[in-house]
Amino acid sequence: MASADELRELLRTEGAAIAANTQGFNDGRNQSVAKLDDYEALKREARATKEDAIEHLPELLSELTATVEENGGTVYVADDSEDANDYICDVVDDRAAERAVKSKSMTSEEIEVNDALEADGVDVVETDLGEWVLQVADEAPSHIVVPAIHKSREGIADLFNTTFDPDEPLETAEELTMFAREKLGEKIVDAEVGITGANFLTADTGTLALVTSEGNARKTIAATDTHVAVAGVEKIVPSVSDLAPFIELIGRSATGQDITSYVSLLTPPVATPVVDFTNDETPLSEFENDRDFHLVLIDNGRLEMREDDHLRETLYCIRCSACSNSCANFQSVGGHGFGGETYSGGIATGWEAGIEGLDTAAEFNDLCTGCSRCVNACPVGIDIPWINTVVRDRINREKAQPADWLVDGLLPDEEDEGAPLQKRFFGNFETVAKLASKTAPLSNWVAGTPLSRWAMQSLLNVDSRRDLPSFKRETFVDWFANRESTVTDPDRRAVVYPDLYTNHVQVNRGKATVNVLEALGVDVVVPPVASSGRAPLSQGMVATATDHAERVAATLDSHLEAGRDVVVIEPSDHAMFQREYEKLLNETAFASLAEHSYEVMEYIYGLLDNGADTAAIPVGDGRELAYHSHCQQRTLSLEAHTVAVLEELGYDVVTSDVECCGMAGSFGYKSDYYEVSMDVGERLQTQLQEIDVQDRQVVASGTSCLEQIDTLLERQPRHPVELLTE
Amino acid sequence: MSQSRSRFETSLDELGVSITVSTETSLPADIDDVITTPAVGVALGEALGLDANPLTETAVAVDPTPAALRQATTGVTAATLAVADYGSLVLTMDDRASELVSLFVDEHVILLRERDLMSGLEATVDAVERRVTESSESAIIATGPSATADMGELILGAHGPKEVHLIVIEEGA
């Protein structure tokens, strides 16, 4: 795992360049996809093509092999990196090549073909400008699409000036680019072998699609007589016409370009003559086209991933980097922190677990907080948080610690085989909260003592710089049990779900919810219900989360049967009901709960929309608010409902647009991630302190967000529903 | 002007690709206006469905040697199709070395028949697929000049052309 020190160092050295670039790409993606007539339909089409292609991969692989060989090329399917490199080195050796020029390819990074060729004495030159900068600097990519994203212009200028000592020192981006163009241009025309990747391969025609912007991949192929294309086996789709949605989505999803400069659709052997660039006698068209083509398809664990029900989706990935750019933690630390041997960002957990193994995935997997902001950004709809959760569960089980017996009797989870102590503490937060409420305020006082904080820090790595939640002696459920309903002739009937935090900590927002709903004519009950399982799920404790889900569904089922709606205050729990329970419950139980549960402000929106009488609700009267929605709430497209309700009631609302507050449940409490959490939080802080926002009352929907904002600002934030009862 | 055509021109404008509207008869003069010498090109008659290669009456050296290509500033080739929605031009990879002439120059001048303008990408990809299936063709969907953001800001002319100029040949005029 990247240590707290390493993450702190990354924040300091690379954080600024990474934040600026990733946020720029993320904004660009949002703007670019908004121009499409039907973005969602394109995504569905792309997803369906990938699902189908991976299902039929063995057949497509045979078809592609036959087609390429019929066209005159050679196909080699390599079991692993060594196998691939041996083959490529043989090809280069047979050609007696002194130099191989390469265009950008993550798969070639994965197999580390450069090292293998260089060991054979071959001069390997990266021609993508970003990759070349890293080759000169001897650094690893920090981003799967824009590999030198962590380097600033000044840093590159220093590097070039020191390494190459040009006559005039280089300074501007233009000068740096033209210098590299010149330098690499000479190397390309002298090379014998060109190595490229492939974004897609089509089985029926043997066509290779390359999505690029610089033109180096085109030159790499056109200027050499031996073309080696390296690609994972998962890149195959049936036919050229399947490529259209991917071409429309990939540039937008990556850097926010509607389309990249060059989409090459090559069906080798390409007809371009192989020329000697020094020849000044023979016209171009009189040179022969005697170019060799080798397609090296890499398995390296992919065919096993295909058999794995949870990792399979990873193979749909088109490596666009939208999951990296939309990830708040990635925006802070980049791929050197949030990445493995080759891949980075949220989907890297799937790739690295499948290709390298759990140990590599374990090094960075905890940086995924499950905030789900990547889910809608992914052009092929991969449930990236779920892959991270499953891999975390596997890591927990593989790395069971000797001290676990200590808590096995104490914590009522289902994780007999594993999960480290810190994860089990946060995963069993319901037990902690129940005990703390029973003994409050004593528990709050004890928890806050220096001795206790020291113990929490050293045993559980709960950061002592964080304020701890203050537990209420009277829970939300207890409060409700001791009062009478004010509704006699209800328009609707609902269960208000007493989530863990509303029940034990933020009891006021529960009370406000009941009062508002009753004022709008809803008959409300607040039964004791198990916590949703969000806490154990986020620690990768899937069995425990499933147990919670089953208990929640069983309790709520009778209420659903009785025609009650389920109203959920905590967005992360609402997201459990809407998204994650699909993985944890049977289809009927999931569908019934998902269909009838609503986020509280979404529910109020619906009541108002259906003509509920708002006479008893205080009006906003132009009061100015700044609203920070919750990450998972936004993924469910439920930010707008809160804003609409507040505006309808007469409030003046501005909204934040950062991807996450940085707290993300337990993440911000963990000592290893405290600085990352605060760095992410600073972006929200900056927005909330802008000149026309700094005096506004802050409202936020999520418990974590409220706690983080409370830390970041002098102003005390509130849940929006609390405004509706004053 | 058709809707596709005006969308196409807007797209090209956003990409910084300048446009000259031409006809079969005025083509040689228009080409000479646009190029910067030394200029090289490929035989274009057949590709554009014209009786003769329009470049023979211009200052463009047709089918140059590799050494002459490397000295050239401008390369002139044809696009087989274009995409109005994106301002994309579909280039071919043929034995006349269109790919080399398009790529190893600072300025790329592209000739397009107006009738080859498609509306959207999907139909264009389908049309490319037909050619791939029939004759194993290769194509480049090229959109604007070559570009990079790897050196700290967006710069045009990374490895390929820094400037792209389009000449649209209108029908029957």
Image (tube, helix red, strand yellow):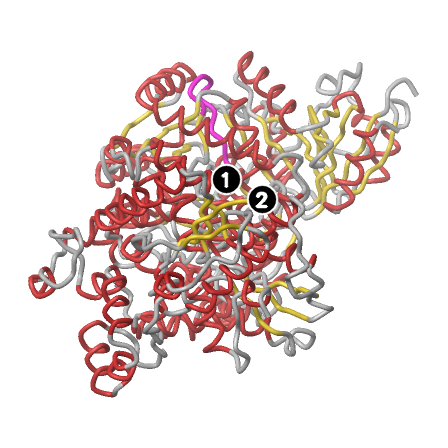
In the image, which disc is placed on residue A252? Answer: 2
Asked whether residue A238 is drawn in magenta, I would say no
Disc 2 residue crowd, few under 14, some 14–19, many 20+, Cα 10 Å: many
| A662 to the left or right of B89 | left
Which residue is most to the right? Answer: B173
What is the chain identity of the residue bearing mark 2?
A: A
Camera sees residue A196 = no
Residue A678, percent from left and from top: 43, 73
Residue A49, percent from left and from top: 46, 26
Q: Could you tell me which residue is drawn at 43 percent across and 25 percent down?
A: A237
Amino acid identity at mark 2: Arg
Q: Secondary structure at mark 1?
A: loop
From the viewer's perspective, is residue B88 above or below residue A573? Answer: above
Q: Could you tell me which residue is drawn at 43 percent across and 65 percent down?
A: A703
Q: CA distance from mark 2 to mark 1?
A: 9 Å
Q: Which residues are magenta?
A: A202-211
Q: Quadrant of the N terminus of chain B?
A: top right
Residue A373, percent from left and from top: 47, 52
Q: Could you tell me which residue is drawn at 68 percent across and 59 percent down?
A: A615
Question: Main structural element of the magenta stretch: helix, strand or loop?
Answer: strand
Please give the residue where the numbered disc 1 appears in the rendered image.
A379
Q: Are marks 2 and 1 on the same chain?
A: yes
What is the chain identity of the residue bearing mark 1?
A: A
| Of residues A47 and A459, the one drawn nearer to the viewer in this rendering | A459
Asked whether residue A209 is drawn in magenta, I would say yes
| B52 to the left or right of A709 | right
Q: Are marks 2 and 1 in contact (CB under 8 Å)?
A: yes
